[in-house]
Image (cartoon, rainbow, N blue to C red):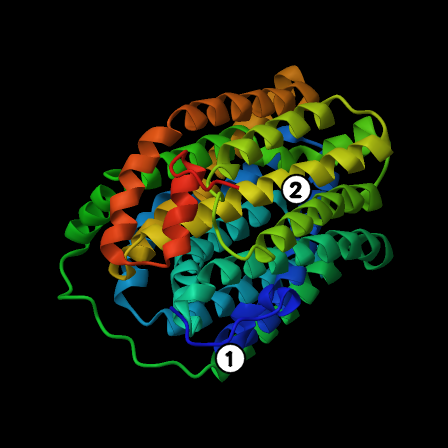
Amino acid sequence: MSSRPPLGTGAGMLRALRSRNYKLFIGGQGISLVGTWIQQIAMSWLVYTLTHSAFLLGLVGFSSQIGMFVLSPLAGVVADRVNRHRLLILTQSLAMLQALVLGTLVLVHSVAVWQIVALSLFISVVNAFDMPTRQAFLIEMIEDRADLANAIALNSSMVNGARLVGPAVAGVLIAAAGVGACFLINAASYLAVIAALLAMRLAARVPHGPVRRIGHELREGFAYTFGFGPTRDIILLLALVSVAAMPYSTLMPIFAVQLLHGGPSTLGFLSAAAGVGALAGAVALASRRSVRGLGRWIPIACGGFGAALIGFAFSRSMALSLLLQALVGLAMLTHLAVSNTILQTIAGDEWRGRVMSFYGMAFMGMMPFGSLLAGALAHRIGAPRTVALGGAVCIAGAAVFAARLPALRRLVRPIYRERGIIPEVAAGIEAATGGGSDRP
């Protein structure tokens, strides 16, 4: 337990910022993520204006994420072996290079769909190594492990604050300066996070045992992650949602133009509305004094995500669509952040890179298949029915997960007793899965 004095409610929401390195990370990454969201909106708009094809929107989404599926397990082994700090500097530098090349191609009027696909494949490889490394590196930035859950919630707040600002800025930039400027702004934004990483002061990392062959460590990581019911069920539900529902965002240009009769600003507002909801969810999670009762929000949020998507699919009102997008963002963020928090607290230090690589594989790695499937389905049955079908799958998955909560409680309780991890975390997971009489 921490020896630091208790904080007030407002300060408690920001308690992870007491760690200097984490404070640097939040500042630099916050700027970079605004640029990332600007690029994502610009990329969708560029592909749609070049092709007017739902299938090609799905193909580009597939290309930008397939690396997470293919390489995440290997990346997890690498993240558990090497200096994570240096690896992050490399991945962020390569991401900056990709944005710079893409912006240059657009500005000299030489961009083609095959180039967009190739550059999307490149960034998917970079992200495959960046995501598990960044997730595993989080605990190295936090001086007091009691602040880990708060750090994850603040990180989600940062991501979704950027999601709120980025798409709105992108809509204005596309209309005023074109998509090329969006890509160059994203390239410049990476300088902030690289500078923050270089400014960190980190203790030497102690290796966890001897380094073995990659294949052996891959098998160990798989067995550790999927041999334990709670981590397995959380990751499998994330994978289901990522295939069935997350790729709705690749079809957003169709909703903005064909169904709501708007343009790039409409697309930006819809994405920003989801960011508002997600930011609200992240702030609510950060304000919690403990994680008691947190786990039960996984099926609630997953089911809510599905219901909001079904409503959005059949909305033809801009005001209603914005409201439903806010609910989509709120539910999606809650599901992801709670899953992340529980996985990080369950995983042992020597396994964290590999566990979080499977989290990344489930969250981002399955999305390319969903993007491809969504594009193909939308071509045949239309975008609204495709999104509604994904929402229905989310609701079904949430129901199955909820039915398994009592079994998860029995598995989690002895793990936290043995490790002596934050007592309130153990109580929270037990309460979330139906154990204990002090559930709020």
Q: Is residue 309 above or below residue 409?
A: above
Between residue 285 and residue 129, name the one nearer to us.
285
Between residue 12 and residue 114, name the one nearer to us.
12
Badge number at residue 264: none
Q: Earlier in the sequence, mark 1 or mark 2?
A: 1
Query: How many numbered tags mark residues here?
Result: 2
Badge number at residue 329: 2
Badge 2, how many Cα within 10 Å: few under 14, some, many 20+?
many
Secondary structure category for the residue under label 1: helix
Query: From mark 1 to mark 2, how far is it between C-alphas?
Result: 30 Å
Q: Is residue 284 above or below residue 395?
A: below
Residue 44: % across, % down: 68, 43
Between residue 303 and residue 175, name the one nearer to us.
303
Q: Is residue 365 above or below residue 311?
A: below
Badge 1, how many Cα within 10 Å: few under 14, some, many 20+?
some
Q: Residue at x 24, y 43 (%)?
A: 222
Residue 283: % across, % down: 64, 55
The answer to whether one can see residue 307 in this image is yes
Residue 54: % across, % down: 65, 30
Three-letter code, disc 2: Gly
Q: Residue at x 66, y 42 (%)?
A: 329
Q: Residue at x 78, y 36 (%)?
A: 323
Three-letter code, disc 1: Arg
Name the residue furthest front. Answer: 437
Is mark 1 in CB contact (under 8 Å) with mark 2? no
User: Would residue 229 appear left or right of 339 to someone viewing this image?
Assistant: left
Residue 306: % across, % down: 60, 27
